[in-house]
Amino acid sequence: MPQNAYLARQPIVDTQHRLVAYELLFRDTAHATGAAIADATAAGIEVISHTLCNMGTDWLLKGKLAFINMDTSMLLGDFSALLPPDKVVIEVLETVEVSSEILERLRAYKQAGFRIALDDYVYTPERADLLPLADYVKLDVLAHGADGILGTVKAARQHGAKLLAEKVEKREQFEQYKRLGFQYFQGYYFARPENLAIKVLNPSQAAVLQLMDKVRQEADVKQIEEGFKRDVTLTFKLLRYINSAAFGLSCEIQSIRHAVSILGYRQLYKWLTLLLATASPSPLAPVLTRTAVTRGRLCELLGAYHLPKSEQDNLFITGVFSLLDVLLETPMAQVLERLTLPESVVDALLHRSGLYGPILELVVACEEADMSRIGTLAESLFLSPEQVNTAHLEALAWVEELGLE
């Protein structure tokens, strides 16, 4: 059943109080005022997972940059590479020890297009090698005061890094650090962190593991597509991820096969690994999941009588997504705000209209064994009762073969 995903975001503004970015912060409850972090790496994975898979960069950032805290494990791991470089500033925590390995990884991030921020930075000879890689240097004005940061300010300027004052709580502090040449500011004077919560479904660990095995073996794309069709949640998350503005694609990706081919095996494996790290050990609502997959397959089969393959792919998505509002306990209109889908799919899901709407209505009528509506809808779609019956039986048999619980 649905779980809640939590994040906080705190605005970062310029000298004119204009919003330029958010720092994304881990939260474990809806009303937490701070982060109860026992494991910085786990917290970082949660932030990345919620950003990419649950909340989505478009909805969460509204076109602004995201500062995301990373400890040593996160910097050296693979999950960060899934983030969109043009939208993310990698914030190197002050606990990260400078080493040749860390410096090499930061250079790789820079080459990939990421910007680097140094969190709570204090200039010392041991940490001097970080400065040439920094786009932003964040200084804690409460901890050090104006006099205590002059050396760090001078060193940052020599390397062209922008200065960001954090924990600014009063107008006097803002004016003081603006006079010192700081370009960006963050703190309670501007805004406290805003807690965000959203209903999410996580795929089962078994489904993710099976797909990871296929991807690792570089199985045929058709086999991988079948794996996605076993789990509604995986399909939902994949299409939202691939259609996010982070990819900058010129066209919408409307089918699972196309999404998989765009991502490639390596990127897809990383994405699945991230899902596995945050997957719920509890099974999804089995009846709803099974029904959604059956709807998708039946829509697809009914469309095959008169429509081309591309439309059949859209019909599968229409069917499986038709129960997302129930699975997520969220109105369908709000669910669709988090997805980029063809207008024809949206019309069917919201209004049962357009090209796919009548087919979805026929599928629901079959599900409810409403013989009167089945006959009327089938006739309007130029389908015979035999064709509808055959497709329904094939869909049920196909779902049986999938082994859904």
Image: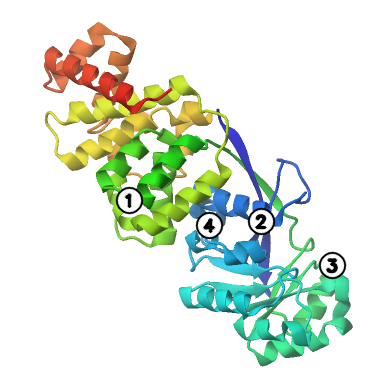
At a point 75% along the width and 42% down the height, the residue shown is 31
- State the separation of the CA atoms marked 1 and 4: 24 Å
Residue hosting label 3: 170
At a point 60% along the width and 76% down the height, the residue shown is 101
Q: Upstream in the sequence, badge 3 or badge 4?
A: 4
- State the separation of the CA atoms marked 1 and 3: 48 Å
Does residue 384 show up?
Answer: yes
Q: Is residue 21 left or right of residue 83?
A: right
Q: Amino acid at mark 3?
A: Lys
Q: Nearer the viewer, mark 4 or mark 2?
A: 2
The relative height of residue 368 versus residue 318 in the rendered view (above or below) is above
Q: Is residue 331 left or right of residue 374?
A: right
Q: Are marks 1 and 3 in contact (CB under 8 Å)?
A: no
Q: Upstream in the sequence, badge 4 or badge 2?
A: 2
Does residue 18 show up?
Answer: no
Looking at the rendering, in which quadrant would you find the N terminus?
A: top right
Q: Upstream in the sequence, badge 1 or badge 4?
A: 4
Residue 239: image x %, image y %? 38, 46
Q: Amino acid at mark 4?
A: Lys
- State the separation of the CA atoms marked 3 and 4: 27 Å
Q: Amino acid at mark 2?
A: Thr
Residue hosting label 2: 41
Q: Are marks 3 and 4 in contact (CB under 8 Å)?
A: no
Helix, strand or loop at mark 2: helix
Helix, strand or loop at mark 3: loop
At a point 79% along the width and 63% down the height, the residue shown is 189
Residue hosting label 4: 62
